[in-house]
Image (cartoon, coloured by chain):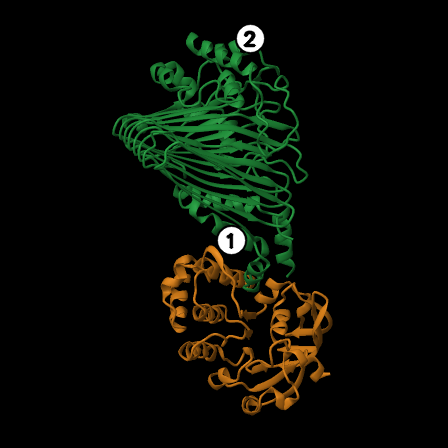
Amino acid sequence: MATTDQEVNELIKREYEHGFVTNIESDTFEPGLNEDVIARLSGIKKEPEWMLEWRLKAYRRWLEMDEPDWAHVGYPKIDYNSISYYSAPKRKEDMPQSLDEVDPELLKTYEKLGIPLHEREKLAGVAVDAVFDSVSVATTFKEPLAKAGVIFCSISEAIRDYPELVQKYLGSVVPHGDNFFAGLNSAVFSDGTFVYVPKGVRCPMELSTYFRINAANTGQFERTLIIADEGSYVSYLEGCTAPMRDENQLHAAVVELVALDDAQIKYSTVQNWYPGDEEGKGGIYNFVTKRGACIGKNSKISWTQVETGSAVTWKYPSCVLRGDNSVGEFYSVALTHNYQQADTGTKMIHLGKNTRSTIISKGISAGKSSNAYRGLVKFGPGAEGARNFTQCDSLLIGDRCGAHTFPYIESKNKSAIVEHEATTSKVSDEQMFLCRQRGIDPEQAVSMIVNGFCKEVFKELPMEFAVEAGKLLEVSLEGSVG
Amino acid sequence: MLSIKNLHASVEGKEILKGINLEIKAGEVHAIMGPNGSGKSTLSQVLAGNEAFEVTDGEVVMNGENLLELETEERAREGIFLAFQYPVEIPGVSNMQFLRTAVNAMRKHHGEEEMNAAEFMKLAKDVSRQVDLDPAFLKRGVNEGFSGGEKKRNEIMQALLLQPKLAILDETDSGLDIDALKVVADGVNALRSQDRAILMVTHYQRLLNHIVPDYVHVLAGGRIIKSGGRELALELEEKGYGWLGIKDEATADNAAN
């Protein structure tokens, strides 16, 4: 018996396992934000003039905007001048030309996170772009992808090498003035991932970006732009972690997806930013704007997210269904524990004829956390025959947490059909007794019940990551029993 | 194997068990009978360690170990199995996954290697046929959308998989038609062995026609008021509980006092 108790105790005590700090020399800007800082940032990145102009325009717009306060979350006011807007590992003048030239300390960091950057390693079927603080440090499998015509690189490279594509699409889905955090990101984004899949190409492997915040007092502002040209297909996955620090850190990313005629983008996220400690100290503020535009007919964008990290999450991956017959999907698992707060959901904007969308949201609250689903389903006047199906399920563990559902439906077309289902349930004492009576540890029982609850979403994840997601839930739920 | 002495237990402050004494040896089959509200189900739940019930006095020793000090899952791993009267559903968790987790928890406890999915599938298919369940049901959610009969057969199947030392069957016959009853009884009879004890809790004697007990105890008002052999059950069927001075559940307490 003693061994069992010991194991349970160890499990409960186990901490956020990605919380280590990499000791690496960095070039970090002094905290503070003004036009000079933006010019310096743009200069370091050797950006063309038009890019700096774009940033400054965004910055001026941002200065006039207010931080949103409508979300069901609370956090102290952020002083945007106390944050450093650029931090990058020190390295020689030029970018490393191959993986062999990447700082071994960085390679070690990613290995420790289970994301080996050697192309022959276990993620052999997945191409990875590794973003460390403000810069992309390595991108794998560039060559085989290039053979297929797929561009997969950091956004900084794309700005230099593919300016036409970037100029055409950057900000086309999430414009400067879209919201406060998107405006800030447009002004100061430091790196991120760029993907272009040409006409008729099915991307030969999963693409993935792994975001790591390392430096203290630094914000991470990455920008991702994915363009799927006519008849193409791409599946993309992002993962995120950060060290354990007592101060809160800001992560304000923007992701834009563009799907042309008959194109499909599948975007999956496993978000595991540091959530703060048991008392709610520290953790990442995850204020992210993610939006996909199905601009072509018969196109499809599918968001799948598993959110277990961050102290505060404010995130609504959305689809603008402009092309006729286009399809938007949102599958989400959001788990909050201890003092975490999440206000997350989606927007499905139906503009084209016969557009369809599906929303499956699973919120799990444990500890003293608060978990809100906020979703908008909107039908424009031209959305003839459009339909949406929404299912929002909440699961409560314990009696000190909260779950909220805020669905908004706006329809300007009488032929549109909306279906909405919502449930709230608890992990019941009877379920726990049944599991334990069969010899199953309480922690394992909760994790199994929660996994069952999330099944519909997990089955949407790429295979390798579905397993990871299940494990992540297990770790995130530790200490939620008893 | 199991020794219950002066066991008192209450739920929400109301005393249900008022001094149970019972000795069960390996290889024996005991039946506990009694009217509704007599405390039969409470006894099963208390032995299995349901925390909704509070043990206020007495002791339960299994194979030399003080059972009351063990957590629910520890009791299970020591060989206590409860076939639930109303098995609860766990949506989205497949029967297969649930059962394999349980079997592996037991194996781990006994220092045995865990079974992989393929090994377990083979075992589970064999056992499911034993209780006449289509192996396809292994893919369904735990008890999700099961008929009453399927739930009961599923419970017996779990007992066959987990091979407990003491199987407690709580009203396993309730809600079964005669064919299903026969299947369940066959399953239980397959469980009978020299080193396993079975404790059956039942309101009716009809189950005992199929699973012949070694001992029959009558529980009323939270105490065992009469014990005997199989013939006691037959006598009860013929004469009713009134024969022992128990009128119905409302007056059961008074009758026993």
Chain letter of disc 2 in the image: A
Q: Is residue B106 above or below residue B4?
A: above
Which badge, 2 or 1, is on the more N-terminal residue? 2
Q: Is residue A366 above or below residue A81?
A: below
Residue at image coords 57%, 70%:
B79
Residue B125 percent across, percent down from the top left: 38, 66
Q: Is residue B217 above or below residue A349?
A: below
Residue at image coords 51%, 17%:
A188
Circle 1 — which element? helix
Give amino acid for label 1.
Answer: Met
> Which chain is represented by green in the image?
A
Residue pointed to by mark 1? A448
User: In the rendered image of this protein, which colour is used for chain B?
Assistant: orange
Per the rendering, the mark at residue A36 is: 2
Chain letter of disc 1 in the image: A
- How far apart marks 2 and 1 lie (CA) works out to 52 Å
Count neighbours of disc 1 (C-alpha within 10 A) and say few if under 14, some if 14 to 19, many if 20 or more.
many
